[in-house]
Image (tube, helix red, strand yellow):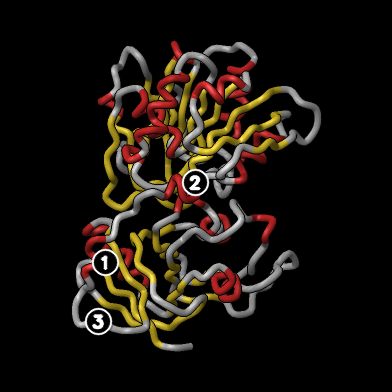
Amino acid sequence: MSKVYIILENGRVFEGESFGAEGEAIGELVFNTGVVGYLETLTDPSYAGQIIMHTFPQIGNYGVIPEDFESEKCHAKGVVVRDWCKAPSNFRSQGDLDAFLKQYGVVGICGVDTREITHIIRETGVMNAMITPNKPDCVPEAVKSYRVTGVVAETSCKNAYVVPPEDKIKFDVALIDYGAKQNIIRELRKRGCRITVFPHDTKAEDMLASNPDGIVLSNGAGDPAENIVCIEEIRKMLGKKPIFGICLGHQLLALAMGGKTEKLRYGHRGGNQPVRVLESGRVYITSQNHGYEVVSESIDKSARAISYVNLNDNSCEGLVYPSLDAFSLQFHPEAHAGPRDMEFAFDKFLDLMKGGRL
């Protein structure tokens, strides 16, 4: 393997070895604390525009399993690991991580001190970085000026399509694709939902014309406030159909309600985020991937209620809008790689489509 470097925006340089595709990559450097689930992470469209660093020391142990992908390809700009497993062992594996990254043209660096880099990000906040085979004398201007923009349009489907349920049709659901994970679709399908997946910029009247029983706002990448057109279309649908927002969908729904979002210091990314249910006091360990939070105080209290909070930083993890038959979650209830009992959120959405109340 050839020598390669990762240059942080603050000027720190770490030398490592190249794996995956050859070349150069610039992106927003973020870390994921998952012990497993690297395939779901690498294929999650929510990572578009970012360089993913895994805090777990060895990645790739169980190889590459296409059935576990959350989309058709790897959306990350680059990958940073301490060590990648060159001899994966799993009866489902169809390849190794190095070949996977080469297939999708994603640059990787291994053999660096990921613990030290994580410490830097935790202390100073998320920053841009470059993976390059050529060590520069100073931080390139392209690294300093890089911004994650346009990623919802980049990852969303281009045309609407229909996904049938696993068995009999019980509900018709409109899913707005802001960069949707496949497991959202899987969870809806197994509950008897026929899903029409719409591109991110579909007009509200066109979605409502399909007469869905409910609307799901998917996860996605980037700054939620950037998506002005999407927010306006959501606003037009408020109160007309039950709405369920997940991750970016949670943030866009809040913005449609007149709320605000702010960037977190280093985000929540991994399968170990503790969330408390305010009503019962129960705590769940959840799967998350986001760099922004909803400023819950920015939304009129008469229109919403906070349902979940993050125990690490007290940020908003869920909102309920009783008068609109709408609710949203910042974390991922579809269980990859979160707890199975969080899937009840989908059942709650089904109950709304049956005429239930929040």
Amino acid type, mark 1:
Val
Q: CA distance from mark 1 to mark 3?
A: 12 Å
Tag in front: 3 or 2: 3
> Mark 1 — residue?
143
**Vertical order, 227 against 65 (above or below):** above
**Nearer-N-terminus badge (3/2):** 3
Q: Please name whichever residue, 307 or 18, is drawn nearer the observer in this view of the structure.
A: 18
* Residue 38 left/right relative to 10: right
Tag in front: 1 or 2: 1
The kind of secondary structure element at disc 2 is: strand
In the image, which disc is placed on residue 287?
2
Give the crowd class for mark 2: few <14, some 14-19, many >=20 residues within 10 Å: many
**Vertical order, 103 against 271 (above or below):** below
- Tell me where residue 161 appears, x and y as whole percent: 65, 38
Give the crowd class for mark 1: few <14, some 14-19, many >=20 residues within 10 Å: some
Q: CA distance from mark 3 to mark 2?
A: 37 Å
Q: CA distance from mark 1 to mark 2?
A: 29 Å
* Count of marks placed on residues: 3
- Tell me where residue 132 appears, x and y as whole percent: 36, 78
The extreme bottom residue here reads 2
In the image, which disc is placed on residue 178?
none
> Mark 3 — residue?
136
Q: Is residue 311 visible?
A: no
